[in-house]
Structure formats: structure tokens, C-alpha cells
Amino acid sequence: MPNGVEQQAEIEEGSDHREISVAEFFEKNKHLLGFENAQKSIITVIKEAVDNSLDACEEDEILPEIHVLIDEIGDDKCRVEIRDNAIGLDRETIPKVFGKLLYGSKFHKLQQSRGQQGIGISASAMYAQLTTGEPVTVWSKQEGEPCHRFVVRIDTEENEPEIIEDEVIDEDSDEFPGDKDYYFDHGTTIEMDIEAKYTKGHHSVRNYLKHTAIMNPYARIVLREPSGNKIEYPRVSKELPEKPKEIKPHLHGVELGVVMRMVESSSARTVSSFLQQEFTRVGRTSAQEICDEAGVDDGRRPNTLEKDEIEQILNAAERVKLQSPPTDCLSPIGEDLVLKGLKKELNPEFSTAITRKPTVYKGNPFVVEVGLAWGGDIEEEGSFDELRYANKVPLLYKKSACVTTKAIEEVDWSRYNISQSGGRPQGPLYVLVHIASVWVPFTSEGKEAVANYDDIRKEMRLALQEAGRKLGRYIGRKERQKIQEKKKRKLTSYAKEMAPAIAQLAGEGDEEEMENKIQKLVERDYNPEQL
């Protein structure tokens, strides 16, 4: 046993320990959320705000209008303002949304949404006060209601909002944000000063918004750059995707620890009713079949199950054929909107899209969508590029760590008349891959890459192969047309020289008529359009 001196030393050592709030943790580890440098941070801030705006609009079936206004206010400092036309937030909610990390409505729901962790926009507010010392200002206007203005700071030690200002303001007052060209009758406006560097190129706000516009062709997005230059990404569809509905987890792939926790908190009286109430696609017959397969009495109380018995039930569920999870918990944009988005922003010569049927990883339903765009304006941009999305949100960073990249590299593109190097296709090609899921397995809190799960990679590969076959047929047909056209030009050029000799052999003196006949034969037999 330790003596008195040793015990006292242990007490004194422990006295230095104290609880750390989540806000305080992320304040010291802001790189985990995507705030690694001034160039990347401005994209992260705008991404989180735009995600919220799009989700809010779709939730209330409003065609999104989003304005992103950026002004440089000093060396490596920018004022960022994001406005939307959603229904706005009530005054009780605003301080918690912008002044408290891990506050949100989406974490516990099995329902597709862009945000899912409750970190995003409040982390942006935290980054603003950390790098410029300034709080975030929020204006919220609900239809038929006055405009509320909040100035909010995060108390990082307590992870609680600190309300600096809270007032109802007149929309014509000087306190309302300027530039009336960007006003909406209702919605939310966020303004914050951040340490940021506005740049152009692949990793830029402009490119992020372009990628967002491709995956959300029903949104109108306007960017005003620090120079005053205005870029509009127009709406090309008035069709919103179906709203996702909340569902329960699916038994195929759900983890043991999760089920053990569910058993403890369930109000079900029997194992059979537990399976039916807590999981989707489990009816009375399939619940009975699972219990029989596992050798567990379906009439027992769930909280009497031992860990080994719960594991037997899970293993049995894998052997029992269950229906796929319902698709109404997901909101893929569909093949038609994928094509509209690609054509709008890339103007390709050829495009195709595939939406796979839903499947499951670790009990979570997901759908993979793929789009390929070839040629056209892409010829001027250079060679291959990939567009990665998770729940309609572009992923610009950590490409090599993402399952999307690994799925692309598993495809034998040469089978589809596309050359490749190091597993990656070459040529004027954009590959779009989108995963829509109730819970996207990101590799980090920054939500920059999707984890390499076998089930997800397989679905992506199958979708890419299906789309690749369509593109391969188009490229093959085009190549055959080129060959036919070359033959046609060659034979046509010979017609004038051949006509006199053929006319003489045929006993016909009209060389011009014979030349016309040869031309018609060439047109009939070597017409590339017939391929």
C-alpha cells in the first residue's frame, strides 16, 4: 500500500486536473474542424453556413436563394456575410445555434441531412472570435414578424452562448446589413469577421460554390467577391428532391454495443416486440425467424438478454433475409438532377448518371449516385477531375484518404475506351460520386473525406462501372464514326478520278453522272450517323 507521502503526492497531482468543455477543446484543436490555415478556413466557414441554409430551405420546401458576400477588411482578414431565404430562426434558438457547440437537432435522427454533428456553424463563430476577437452577428426575419438582431459570443469554458446584443430592428435602419440588392423578405443573415485569405483555384470559395451548384441545381447561389465581382450560379430546376423522413436503424450491420444500449433503454416487453419496435423492416414473422435462428426465446424480456445472446441475435439477423431499408429516409437528387447540374456548370459533350438502389453499412441506409461528364468545355480545362459529395456537400480536401478515390482507382477504365494511369482515368473527364446517407462515416470532424468501408466502396465501384459502360459505348461509337468519316473522305476524293474509268467500262459516257452515283454509294455505305 502507498504510504502517506505517496498518497499526498497523488492528491496534489490530481488537483491540476479539471473538466474540459467541448468548446474549449476545439478552440485549442481548431484544425480538427477544418480551420487549418487562412485559405482553408474561409471555405470551411462558408461551407458550414451554406449547408445550414440549404437544409433549412429544403426542410420547408423553399427553392434556395443564397448570397455569399465577402469583403477584405485587413491583412488576411475578411468579413463574410451569408444570407438565405429560409423561414428564419426564432429568437430563443439563435443564441444556442451560434453560441454552443454540439447543439443541434440532427445528431440523433436517422435521416439524411448535410449537418449531422451540431458543430459546424457554431465552430465558425468560435473561429471568428478566436482569430479576430469579434463575435458573430445574426439577423433573423420570419415572415410577418419583425427582424431580430443578435450579437453572440461563445463562452468556451462553459460551452454556453453569451448574448452581447439582442434587439428588434427596423429594416431601414443603419444597423441592418447593407446592399439591398441582396435582401429577402424572410430568412437568416450571418456576419462574422475572420482570419482568412481569399484565393482562386481548386481550393477556393468560388470552386466550392461551383461544386455546390452542380449537386444542388435547384438552388440559386450568388457570390460577391472582395473585388466587387459578382458570380451567379443560376437555378436550372424548380424540382426539389423528396424530403427525407426519420427512420429506425436496420439490423444488418448494426453494432453490438449499440444494440446492448438499446436493449437497456427499450420499453418493449418481449424480444420479438423489441426487434419490431426498434428496427426498420422487421415484422412479426422475421422477428420470430431471427429468434429461432439464434436459439433465443422470443417471449423473453429484452433486458434479461446476456451479451452473448444479443450477439447471437445479430449473427442470426445477418442470415435472415430482411427487406432493404426504406428509401424515404434518404434524399438522393436523382439521375435527372445530376445530369442538369453537370450540364449547367461543365457543358460537356456527353454526360450520364446512375442512382443505385439503397443498401446498408453498419445498420445505416445509404445510396450512391454517380455522374460522368466527357468532352465539351472540359477539353479546355485539361484532364480528369473528380467531384466528391456527401449528402450533397462538396468534399474538396483529403482526396487520397476518401473511399471515393479508392473506388475510382478500382475501376478498369480501359474497358470503357478511356486510358488510365496509376489506376486513375485520363482525358477530358469529370467523375461525380455522391453518397447520401442517414449517417456519413467521415474520417474526421472536419467532414472532408468518407471512410473506406467495403460496402460503400463496392456500391461506388458498381455505379462507376455501370456509368462507365454507357460512356464507353458513346466513345466507341464516336471512334467508329471517325473511322467511317475518314473512309468516306478518302473514297469521295477518289470519285472524280474513278468516274471516267468506271463510265467507260460501263459503257456510259456521262462522267459527271457517274461521279454523282459514286458519291451517293459512298454516302449510303459510309454514313457515320448510322453507327
Image (cartoon, rainbow, N blue to C red):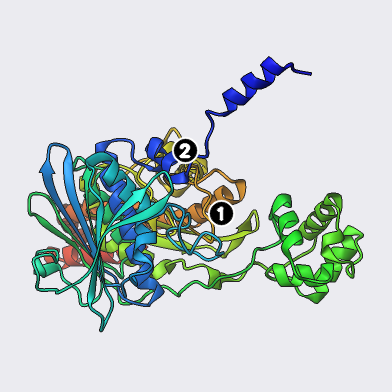
| Quadrant location, the N terminus | top right
Q: Nearer the viewer, mark 2 or mark 1?
A: 2
Left or right position of 120 against 455 = left
x, y (%) of residue 514? Answer: 18, 65
Between 38 and 422, the one lying in front of the other is 38
Residue at image coords 9%, 54%? 229
x, y (%) of residue 331? Answer: 47, 68
x, y (%) of residue 130? Answer: 29, 41
Q: Quadrant of residue 4?
A: top right
Q: Of the residues shown, which amino acid type is indicated by label 1?
A: Glu
Q: Looking at the image, how many numbered discs can be counted on the residues?
A: 2
Q: Is residue 311 visible?
A: yes
Q: Secondary structure at mark 1?
A: helix
Q: Secondary structure at mark 2?
A: helix
The mark found on residue 479 in the picture is none
N-term mark: 2 or 1:
2
Q: Which residue is mark 1?
A: 459
Q: Which residue is mark 2?
A: 401
Q: Is residue 124 visible?
A: no
x, y (%) of residue 182? Answer: 14, 68
Q: Of the residues shown, which amino acid type is indicated by label 2?
A: Ala
Residue at image coords 53%, 49%? 441
Q: Residues within 10 Å of mark 1 (few under 14, many from 20)?
A: many
Q: Relative to 204, is 91 above or below?
A: below
Q: Residue furthest bottom?
A: 144
- Asked if marks 2 and 1 touch (Cβ < 8 Å), the reply is no
Q: Estimate the spatial distance between the alpha carbons at disc 2 and disc 1, rounded to whole Å.
A: 17 Å
Q: Residues within 10 Å of mark 2 (few under 14, many from 20)?
A: some
